[in-house]
Amino acid sequence: MRSKLIQLFLCPLLVTGLILAPLPALESPSVSAASVTTKATAAAASQVQVFVDGKKLTLSAAAYAEKGVTFVPMRDIFTALGASVTWEKKTETIIGRKGNITISLKAGKKEAVINNKAVRLDAPSVVRGGVTFVPARFISEALGATVKWDHAAGAVRITSAQSAEWAAYDKRLSEQKKQIAMTTKEIVAKYDESIVMIITNRGQGSGIVIGDNLILTNYHVITNAASATAMTIDGDQLQIAGVVNYNEKSDMAIIKTEKRMSIPAVELGYGLNIQKGGKVVAIGSPLGLQNTASDGLISNIIYEGGVRYIQTSAPIDHGSSGGALFNENGELIGITTLGYSNTNADLNFAVAILHAAALKSEVTDELLKEAKFLPSALPDTLVGAPLSDIQELMTAQFSSVSTIEGEANFTKWEVKRDSAGWLVLTADIDPIFYMYYGPGTSDELRLWAINLGYELHDLLPDEKIQVLISFERDYGFEPRGFAAGEVTPLGGDKWRVRYPVIDMQLKDQLHIKVRD
């Protein structure tokens, strides 16, 4: 679990180059081992100890120093550093692998290959007494570790990349514990100006200023939009030029304003200083109420599909998407994304900020220059389109809706024109889902129908349209209590129940009826 966390929360230490210099001499840690005399080297041959991450290695054969280079048994050092190793006896070749690093070297050769790149060695690997020895510094640094010579102990001390990362992580946590907690009032005063309301041609959300002309928001806020405006707390309207970078899986996007903003940018970190029960403050624009602040606790930290979510009791609502979630030290730790309705538990969620930090790190000058709105999944119009095209679109784009109880799926889409000239679109809702969750998700089904109505009106502005989503299931008995025509005998002691769950009608106005 500890290894997994470090991969999620810390950038790997960068190895900018292999330091292939020999180990320091016994006389001074800062002097090259090449200065060690032959006599000193011989004396140290049976006395060299090897430590990895503070633990002394039990070696299969004694490590020794020769001409300023410390040699250790091949398998011992590779294994201690978490790498696999293969010895090809015929060619006397050593092949070590760890993650995306592959090392190859031959006994007696002062050249090695790291990821297909040749490098020179100060000393070659050797075979002595049936044991293959390799230069400790080269192997360690090739695998991202650091190496130091302990003069007092006559030992080589190796620190793996993972251990160094954990040390940095622990140091950061220690520093964060010393930070002074801020009140909700102080957090709002510091960041309120940096949170904006996003208005697109399809909806409304929130955003966080993270640069001179960059705003972080949710992917679902900006997807399918052809235009957008960011409104500051002072009432200034900033036109959005387009999307710079996005990740649909983590539901995040970075958008660019046409003009630079004179608004303080919020720093993006990795959100390490969070724990269950910690205080948080959310700022966003729920239901268009700009820069609404709320506070609560971190209720849970969960992972789903490779995305880290922070569950919080801080209230949010539609329009809060893309807003900010701060911890009690005033650090941005998440992007408010979604919440459950029809519950008193304040079940709300934010995507952890580490995903945003990764997204911003990928931004290049080229992406900034080419910022544009994402292609819409919907056509510009369906006027004049054959009914089969409309049916294909409904099947591809409107076959499910996410609810607090899971996905509600719609199948068997059909599009027909009736004798009165109405365009009638029909589909069936998953009967099991509706029987169990229909009443509890009726508000979400209604909202889905409203959004669908606006989409269809944009695509077919002059049409009279009716959308009927129905429940249908067959039974081995005759169900009672239904309206005339909702129960049909099929013969053989079988009856079919069918009735509309959603009846949405529109032209210049919209009427929706949802059956609980």
Image: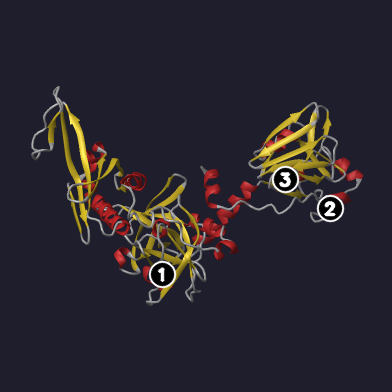
Vertically, is 391 above or below 88? below
Q: Which of these two is toward me, 76 or 192?
A: 192
Of the numbered discs 2 and 1, the one sitting upstream in the chain is: 2
Mark carried by residue 230: 1
Q: Please indicate, yes or no, whether residue 232 appears anywhere in the rendered image.
A: yes
Q: Which of these two is toward me, 144 or 415?
A: 415
Around disc 1, counting alpha carbons within 10 Å, would you say few (fewer than 14), some (14 to 19), or many (20 or more)?
A: many
Mark carried by residue 142: 3
Q: Secondary structure under badge 1?
A: strand
Could you tell me how far apart the alpha carbons at marks 3 and 1 are, in whole angstroms? 48 Å
Could you tell me how far apart the alpha carbons at marks 2 and 1 are, in whole angstroms? 59 Å
> Residue 199 falls in which quadrant of the image?
bottom left
Residue wearing tag 2:
32
Of the numbered discs 2 and 3, the one sitting upstream in the chain is: 2
Mark carried by residue 222: none
Of the numbered discs 3 and 1, the one sitting upstream in the chain is: 3
Q: Which of these two is toward me, 353 or 274?
A: 353
Around disc 3, counting alpha carbons within 10 Å, would you say few (fewer than 14), some (14 to 19), or many (20 or more)?
A: some
